[in-house]
Amino acid sequence: MLKFDFTNLFSNKVPNNITLDEVKSYENKINQIIKEIDTNRPGFVETIFSRKWIDSVLDLKDTIFQFDNLVVLGIGGSALGNIALQNTLKPLNWNFLSKEERNRKLRIFVIDNVDPDFVASILDTIDIRKTLFNVISKSGSTAEAMSNYLIARGIIETYGLDPKKHLIFTTDPEKGVLRKIANEENIKTLEIPQNVGGRFSVLTPVGLLSAYAAGINIEALYDGAKIAYSRFLKPLFENPAALIAITHYLYYNKGRNISVMMAYSNRLYHLADWYRQLWAESLGKKLDKDGNIVNVGQTPVKALGAVDQHSQVQLYNEGPDDKIITFLKTEKFNRDIKIPNVHEEEALSYLQGKYLSELLNNEQLGTESAILEHGKPSLKITFPVIDEVHVGEFFMHYELATAIAGELFNINPYDQPGVELGKKITYALMGRPGYDDHKINIEEKRIEL
Ligand SMILES: O=P(O)(O)OC[C@H]1O[C@](O)(CO)[C@@H](O)[C@@H]1O
């Protein structure tokens, strides 16, 4: 199980700190929220109690393992879970290993952006004949995913290959242009449960296919998610998701409107990236459930230890009192490196003979202590080891925490109306029929240098 340490959130060293009594005063409300979630089971919870989604991926086994590369084409919730799974659970040099070293599992690439330099750099690297493309889009219409699909398809056709053999669409069971094309052309598909939104979809086929293709144990991901769910049904002070939600909510109300997730592990860093979308899109809302303008939301920020000690920590310690910090660390790294005894130099003797893991984890503890001395609240999540069970558990704790936080803020955590306008203006700029109303009026008085 993941270990959670909430001690420093309640310390008297934090001016205007939250107290256990304050948290306790929300106990009834939170119990009610938990009961409601458990009764109505939102889609992301329902998913982990069904074999359907794992089985739908396992059914594609023969197709997947004919290939050497899997390229995911999707953005936002249709990409970030894939990226997090690969980076936390596979060696960071996975795509550089030989096929034998990879045990014949696939190299995984995720093309989310539409930056031509980025897209070309991946397409230039892979052998198209040995590549399976997984186009992921819940809506089946997102411009970035669609344009990258069209590019991939164009290349497949240019090579004289059969698109049906090189494409899998992961999309809504009924709606969207991807579903239409799949039906017309008999392209293999995976379903995204209709009641699961993109940022909550990592444990649906959205994240499962690339994970499985790389040899990740997808069943163990579900085992971990179920552990998180069983902890979510426990009383408030034994319930990590509820404590994350209420402590962030209370500190937000005391002016801490930035939530930093600082991972002391290059692998765990990608979980912080996933968390950014979840926390931002779910909780950043203009209207509450009663239609009042509230403009709430806590800005999630990711940071990497020890790197950001030399970039961000000065600000965290001495800048505005507007942050709550979550540290991620692991007790066990897959590899370790002993720092050799090279010099008879006293200034270096504290390092020589020690392990990098020891240095990094002491840096974490040092930063956590320094941050507390500067009066800033933090919590810490420790992975006993970075494996499927703990990563699955992490995803589910945060999805549940987000659902609870949504209720505390009295907003809908499952929609994202604020991203629509930008999409429509882009459509208009790109000449998509039906979007003329969204043509922008360029300011006549320019302030341009
Ligand atoms: O899976 P889709 O429908 O292509 O959407 C991709 C992403 O775009 C958004 O709708 C808006 O950013 C996200 O919520 C979503 O994860």
Image (cartoon, rainbow, N blue to C red):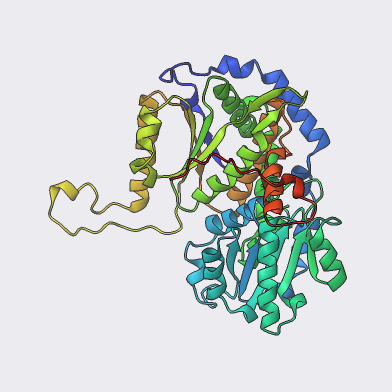
Please report the residue visible at 48 percent of the width from the left and 26 percent of the height from the top.
322
Please report the residue visible at 66 percent of the width from the left and 45 percent of the height from the top.
440
Vertical position of residue 199 compared to residue 334: above or below? above
Vertical position of residue 116 compared to residue 9: above or below? below
Vertical position of residue 70 compared to residue 345: above or below? below
Question: Does residue 349 appear left or right of residue 55 in this picture?
Answer: left
Marker count (numbered): 0
Residue 89 image point, x, y percent: 55, 57
Please report the residue visible at 87 percent of the width from the left and 70 percent of the height from the top.
184
Question: Does residue 272 appear left or right of residue 337 in this picture?
Answer: right
Please report the residue visible at 74 percent of the width from the left and 29 percent of the height from the top.
34
Is residue 245 or residue 147 the one in the foreground?
Answer: 147
Is residue 327 or residue 147 the one in the foreground?
Answer: 147
Vertical position of residue 17 compared to residue 79: above or below? above
Residue 157 image point, x, y percent: 71, 80
Question: Does residue 291 appear left or right of residue 294 in this picture?
Answer: right
Quarter location, residue 63: bottom right
